[in-house]
Image: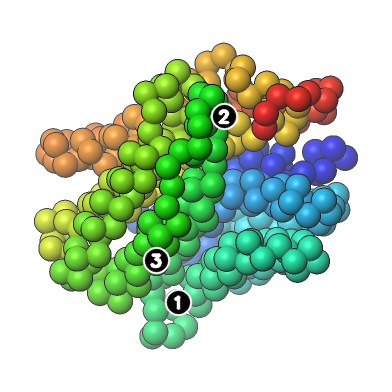
Amino acid sequence: MYFFERAFRPFFLGGALFAVIAMTFWWWQYPDVTQTYAGISAINWHAHEMIFGYALATVTGFLLTAAMNWSRMESASGWALMMLFTVWLLARLGYLFDLPLSWIAVFDLAFSLGLVLHFAWPVWQKRLKQQVGLLLVFVAIFFANLAFYTADHQAWWSAHDALIAGLFLVLTVNLTMLRRLTPFFTEKALGLNSMRNSIRLDQFALGGFILLLICVLFSPVNWLITLIAWPLAIVFAVRQAWWYHKGIWSQLLLWPMHVSYAFITLGILLYGFVGIEWLAASLAIHALAAGGIGLLCSSMMARISLGHTNRNVFEPPRGLVWVFIALAFAAVARVLLPIIIPQQTLLWIELSQLGWIVGFGLLVMLYWNILTRPSAPNSSILR
């Protein structure tokens, strides 16, 4: 039962496979978005499944594995992990097979709540105070997902509000991962001294990001968004400048993390233009999602899968570079090319969809044996 010994195996493989399947469905029907999934509009289904399906699965694989390492507890392993993965999978299949939405909601909310409980147990038992912030974000993600399923039954929020909240909250988790791991991996891979950091700047970055979320939710087109977004983009850019080293481009499992962070910074910058109605919000959203989440989650999956199966993280599978090139192209095509050549926006979106499918399809092919077979003999290679 080694496949369910650690969360990274089922959730990385399941998340990557689902990224291909869900985007293929989206590409196949686009631009005709009149189809529904379990009564949910195609656009809302696409957004929900990219956030609460694909992205949250990858985050689950990483952080439940990390929680077990931090606590030395078997908190998300065996039958408990299998059940968590099963309800995640049933929710994804429920949409594709047009099951009743009430059933899908039960499965999906069970997954979101299960993630909270699996993460909370070792944090509570081992008094891991540094991880309480992440736990609170997971709680907020559960309520954002709940808000999505209850949006039609009240007037206080919409499905779009729930999706925006979910996107920003998943990104908050991703930004926490980036803050902890990007400078660390850069230092270790390039043999550098400790990189420059500032707790105060970190606080400004996280606080500003949450404040931006609040403004986007309550006043999606307002100069206040611009007033927050542009200074916040400068804060993010300063941090990236501190972490940058020209040597990152020689490390295949390093540069996608830096590019991911750059797309998140770009997304924040673009939100400033959204606030003054110079750009459509979808461009900022996809900079955060396709560029930020897509590249980060794929690079973390690629690295962690090697390290936790006792393989050399400095010798990734041949062909992996094309995964990151395809996903970077998908982000550029979805965000930058529509700004540069807007009259061809439909073409750029379709090319972006294909880039995503190719990238994650190749990632599944390269990592199938790594994730589905027992780990290699123990190694001292850095994870």
Residue at (54% x, 38% y) in the render: 184
Q: Residue furthest top?
A: 318
Amino acid type, residue under disc 2 in the picture: Lys
Query: Would you say 296 lies left or right of 222 here?
Result: right
Q: Nearer the viewer, residue 250 or 263?
A: 250
Q: Is residue 359 above or below residue 14?
A: above
Secondary structure beneath dot 2 equals helix
- Between disc 2 and disc 3, the foreground one is 2
Amino acid type, residue under disc 1 in the picture: Ala
Gap between marks 2 and 3, in whole Å? Answer: 29 Å
Q: Circle 2: is it few (<14), some (14-19), or many (20+) Cα within 10 Å? A: few
Q: Is residue 120 above or below residue 380?
A: below
| Residue 316, quarter of picture | top right
Label located before the other in sequence (2 or 1): 1
Q: Nearer the viewer, residue 130 or 59?
A: 130
Q: Circle 1: is it few (<14), some (14-19), or many (20+) Cα within 10 Å? A: some
Q: Which mark is residue 151?
A: 1
Gap between marks 1 and 3, in whole Å? Answer: 27 Å
Per the image, the residue denoted by label 2 is 188
- Between disc 1 and disc 3, the foreground one is 3
Q: Is residue 317 above or below residue 187?
A: above
Query: Would you say 285 lies left or right of 151 here?
Result: left
Residue at (28% x, 34% y) in the render: 333
The quadrant of the picture occupied by the C terminus is top right
The quadrant of the picture occupied by the N terminus is top right
Gap between marks 2 and 1, in whole Å? Answer: 46 Å
Secondary structure beneath dot 1 equals helix
Query: Would residue 52 be visible to someone looking at this image?
Result: yes
